[in-house]
Structure formats: structure tokens, C-alpha cells
Image: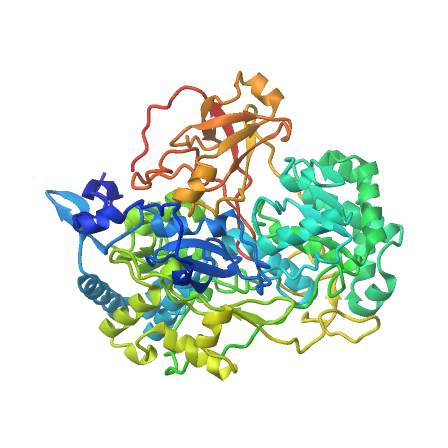
Amino acid sequence: MNKSRREFIKLSAIGAGGLVLANPLLNAMIGQVNAAEPMDASKIKRFPTYCEVCFWKCAGWVYTDEKGEIWKIEGNEDDPHSNGRFCPRGTGGIGMYNDPDRLKTPLMRVEENGKQTFKEVSWDKAFRFIAEKMNKIKEESGPESLALFKHGSGGAHFGKLFKAFGSKNITAPSYAQCRGPREVGFNTTFGSNINSPEPVDLENTKCLVLIGNHIGENMHNSHVQEMSKAIDRGATIITVDPRLSTAASKSKYWLPIKPATDIALLLAWMNVIVSEELYDKNYIAQYAYGLEDLQAHVADKTPEWAEKITTISADVIRQTAREMAFHAPATLIHPGRHVTWYGDDTQRLRAMAMLNALLGSWGRKGGFYFPEKAKVPSYPHPGYPPVNWTWKDHLDGTYALADSSIANVFVDMSHPDNESDYKIKGWFVVGTNLISTIPNTQRTLEAIQNLDLLVVVDTMPMEITGYADIILPECTYLERYDDMRVSPNRFPNVAVRVPAVKPKYLSKPSDWIVRKLAKKLKLSKHFNYESYSEVIDWQLKQMGSSLAEMKEKGVLKMERKTPMFIEEGDYHEFGTSTGMIELYSLDLEMEGFDPIPNYTPHPEPPQGFYRLNYGRAPMHTFGRTANNPNLNELMSENCLWVNPFVAADNNLENGQEVWLKNQDGVVSDFPIKVRITERIGKDNVYMVHGFGRANKKLKRSFGRGISDTQLVTNVMVDPIMGGTGMRGNFVSFVTDKPESEVIS
């Protein structure tokens, strides 16, 4: 075998940042905990921020003590994302700042004594190396051959750099690996995307339907608060889930569905509502297109038909359908967020959108409201150069309904087997661990080996950093300015982030990194400011405020300009081809797909195997927080939920450590502890995503539990929008320690 051009390098092998840690003063700061002693209140300061621990981005306040050290974080009462209350992740964000394992200095891949390792370098040397590589790729293949994978606020700054350089090949894994099918499913029905936060009127919902949606475990802050209030006032909750989730435990109806049969249930619900004429007749008559086609389509999709597929009794299917109709239009079938499951996900979300339409909940109180978003002026800069091609040209019309870039397509464009004219030669990876976010890890690694440049920008040494040519340490969100948070909500609003402390070690904000790299690339004209505070202040002044004012307020609310709901009988034009709600989708038909969803059976687990399901925990965000000192104390590893009958069949005991082997023979690097529980069915097992970290530099999370991503080798790509279905993998139990060892 030829030597790898880009070997995985253990960051622990270089002493975890030798030059930086050689400083005894900095050494003394690592892991320092503020003593619980009386503080001088007059010296306590607060700084506005919005949280970066998850995408909800709740606005809050960071407090520093008399020594200027971060003391605590709490919510901003004026913020509609948090209502003044932070979840465990938000309050634990201070752990990101204090984590001694965080990246501290720029690192460059070098070869010493025939072995690849990382060497600490200056920021200037790192920038010179990157600029030379970028310009070489540009000269040989064009600027479009550089791609940006991004997540979080820091990625926005690099997006501007890439556009200035001449590339629009920019992607966020959150689309194809998480939410994309719901955007296309709802857009082809209502002509509108869902976006974040989801515009669901939980404040007034009388009946909430959750399909594989774990509110309370995914900790979408304002939605958790609103759902709690809905439960207190007696709202009906219907949860469809093969596992008794936290939400299911609070529900009037728990439907423990057989995995991969959700479309059959949705079609049967529509059969009941249409055949019994329980749909909103006036609403459908005025706003919907294709009712007669839908009636014919679901005529034979009876509850009895669905019972044989889903294992949910026909009586329960009818009862829950009638309950939804009884509370309509204040009935909400929640669209969820992580919806890339089985490859037919866009059609499943289409069915959910259509069910909402039949109940009249879109644009109605207790259903979906119409959000408004604040308009923030763009800071003056020269126009970006035109590009010769983008990722869409590589697809040649495939996934035409996708309204955002598809991360796995970027991997394909970088892979050695790409024979098209559109090739990616270099990656910037900002704030996302592609090893655990994009399924089919082996293909991602093969693509990485084919690159001429890989730059990773992060706060922590994730698995992806081990393959980088250059690692740039980004400071945490508590130490920097960023673009204002602008998100659609009931009322337009913006929130600011102001640094509460200076960046630790040699880490830097992304806006600083971009500005310095732009100078090396002779692109400084696009970044004509000395501090990002200038950008924010200029934007706010155009909006009638200022950064000085926002440092005191944190959140700026504005008045709505359009109605929040459709009033009875109002004219409303939808953004579809017909201008109406499309129960029969002309866009899908035009692209050669079913205009109304159909149920197609999915493969069953082989003998001795069980479907692998995964989810979230309220104290963690993906794999980014598993090493956080504060949050790791709340949950340090995941466990494997196993049904008692399955445990008995496999001679498993509670707390026993097992390894998992998937249908393709892949064995997990690490073991996981068994949790025997009746809260899960017999045909699947469940674990929380984001554990089993394979980088030894992550001292708290290394080898703790299993990474579900490692076992996801069967990826079912959604033919409509390119999303990666990841719940078609099956695992069996390995009770003896495998001989192979993880490379880390």
C-alpha cells in the first residue's frame, strides 16, 4: 500500500501545544475554576451575546467578575429564542472557554524522520502557506475548485472570503444531513420553507403531533418552553416514535410505530380525514389545489391497510385522526428538524405538510404563523467576481428542487472517481467535524486524500483536524464579535454578540483570520475595517440604533409589517406554481417524481440484527460538546437502549459493555454500555449521537461510548433533493473485545 499523503496525526503526540503550554502563566490558567467567594458587585460587568452551542442561538448575557474572568451566562428576557432562560447547553457554554483541550495555536503538517506530525507555526506563516496553495489551485484549476464546509457563525466570515476569491462552492452539512427534506417537502406544498426557528404557533396549539421529533431532548429552547405550557393547559400530544421518548412520556397518545413505515401512517390519517370529510372545507376550497386527486390516491389507504404495515392498530389510527380534526385548525403536525432517515424523506415531509393543509393549520392560529425577518443592510464592499461554475453544474439538473448546497456532493466532487470537468481540489472546514457529520466516512477520507489543501478552523481538536494541512484555532463565541443574529420569528429582531474577554492563548476570531488571510490574497478591499465592531455599528446605525445602545439591550425588536395569520376569507397567494397549496405537486411531477406520496416498503433487519436509531440529549449538541468540562459532567458517555426480549435473546445484562457490528461488517472502535428498557421496541436499538470520539486529545470524551456515524455505511440518498438517509443501518452485538484497535 502506498503511503498516505495525509496521515491522521495524533495531536496528543506533540504535547498538546508545546510552545503555548511552555508558558507557566498560561499553564496556571488551564482548568482554573472561579472560587465561590464574595464578589464586589460594583465590578461585575455584563456583555451581550448569543449562544453558539446550538443553532437556536439564544441571546443572553455573559457576566465577568472583579478579576475580569467569566463568571456566568444567563438568558436575555427580551429574546424570543430564550425568553430569559438558557438550557443546560447555554449555561454550560463557559466550559468551551475553559476547556484545557481546546486548540491554542496554529499548526502545520510537516514530515520529520519519515513521519507526519504537526508543528506549531506563527499566524503569518500559516497565512502565507494557505495563500500560496490557494493561488496555485486557482491558477491550475480556477478559484471554484476551492470549497467551504461551514457551520456556525464563524463560517459566515469565510463565506465572504470565498466569494471575494471567486468561489461560490459553499456548503453547510446541516442541509443534506439534517433539514433539507422538510424544506423541499413544505416548499412544494406551500411555496415556503420552514427555516429556523420553525414558525410553529405552540403558544396556541390545541393538538400537537410529533413524528420522530424529540422536543425536550433536542432542547430547542423556546419550543420546549412553549410545549411545556401547552401540556399544562391540557393540549393533546400525539407522539409517533418507536421509542418512548421524553415527549412520548408526556403524550395522550404514544404510537410506537415500526421504523420506516411513517408514510403509511400519514396516508391512513389522510384517508380518515378525507373519507369522513373532517378536513377544513372552506380553507381547502379557497386555497388548495388537487383535492380530488388526493381523495382518489388515499381511497384504499385505510387504517386497516396501515395497521399491517405500521403495527399501529386501525382503531388508534382513526381515533388520533379524529382528535386532530376536532382541534383543527389549532392542530400542528410539527415538521421536526433532523429528518434524513430512509431516503424517501422529502415525500414523508410532503405527506406531513399535506396533512397540515387538510387541517387548515398553515397560516392559522395554533398551527403555523408567517414569520418576519429583520432587514440588515450589507456593509459596503466591492462586488464579488463572477464565477464560471458551481456545484449545480456538476449535477447537471439532478436535485433541481434542492434550494441549498449538498455537502455530500462536494465530497463526490473531491473524490478520485470524479470524472467530470468540475473538480474540487481544496477544502476549508470551519466549525464542522465532517468525519461525524457526513455519512460514509470512508468515502470522505478517500476524498480528503485527493485534496491539494485542507484547512480546518475550529475551537476543538475534532477528528477532522487530524487530517488537516493547516489547523487554525478559532476563539470561542465568548471572545469575539460576529454578525448579528437575524432570524425569522413572530416579530423581527436582531441580537448582538460582544466579546466578554480577550481570546485565550493564540486563538483568534474568524473575522480577524479572514481579514489577515484576505490581505495575503490581495483581497483586502472586500474587508475594509479594522474591527468587526465597525461593521456591526454601521449596520445598526442604518437601522436607527447603534452598537453602544445594543451593548446595553442585547436584543432589538421591531414591529411587524404584515399579518401573522390568514384571516378568515382573506386572499392569500402561495409561492407554488399554481399560487395555491398543492396537494398535488406540479413541481414534483415536472421533475419526474410522485406528485402525491406513496408508501414503499424498506428493507428489514437481517436475522440477529436490529435497526440502529440515534437521537439527541438535552445537555449536548452533536459531538461538539462531549468534551465540554461542564456538560461532560452531566453526561459523559452514551448508552445503548435494548428491549428486554432482545437482551434475553442475546444474553445481555444491564450495564454490560458491548461492541456493535453493522450489516457491512464494520465494528465499532469502542464499546458501549447496555441499558435494558421497555421504552424501545424489539426491532431496533437506540443511542445518543456525538460520542465515541476518536481523538485522544479530547481527554474527557475519547473512547467514551460509540459513534453512531461510524456504523452508518448504508446511506439512502433522497432522489428528490440529495439528502442522506442514515437510519437504514442494522447492528448486531459483539460481546468479546475485537482485535482491531482504533487509529487515533
Q: Identify the image quadrant of residue 683.
A: top right
- Between 193 and 381, the residue placed more toward the observer is 381
**Residue sitting at 75 percent across and 39 percent down?**
253
The quadrant the N terminus occupies is: top left
Locate residue 133, reporting x and y percent: 23, 64
The quadrant the C terminus occupies is: top left
**Residue sitting at 34 percent across and 64 percent down?**
510
Q: Is residue 741 left or right of residue 401?
A: left
**Residue sitting at 25 percent across and 76 percent down?**
522
Asked whether residue 341 is in view, the answer is yes
> Residue at the left extreme?
113
Q: Is residue 490 left or right of residue 398?
A: right
Asked whether residue 347 is in view, the answer is no
Give the answer, above or below, for where 61 lies relative to 166.
Answer: above
Q: Is residue 618 left or right of residue 628?
A: right
Q: Is residue 671 left or right of residue 256?
A: left
The image shows a total of numbered marks equal to: 0
Q: How is the image coloured?
A: rainbow
> Residue at the right extreme?
276
- Between 298 and 727, the residue placed more toward the observer is 727
Locate residue 571, reporting x and y percent: 79, 76
Locate residue 567, reporting x and y percent: 80, 71
Locate residue 516, reporting x and y percent: 26, 70
- Between 262 and 470, the residue placed more toward the observer is 470
Q: Identify the image quadrant of residue 277.
A: bottom right
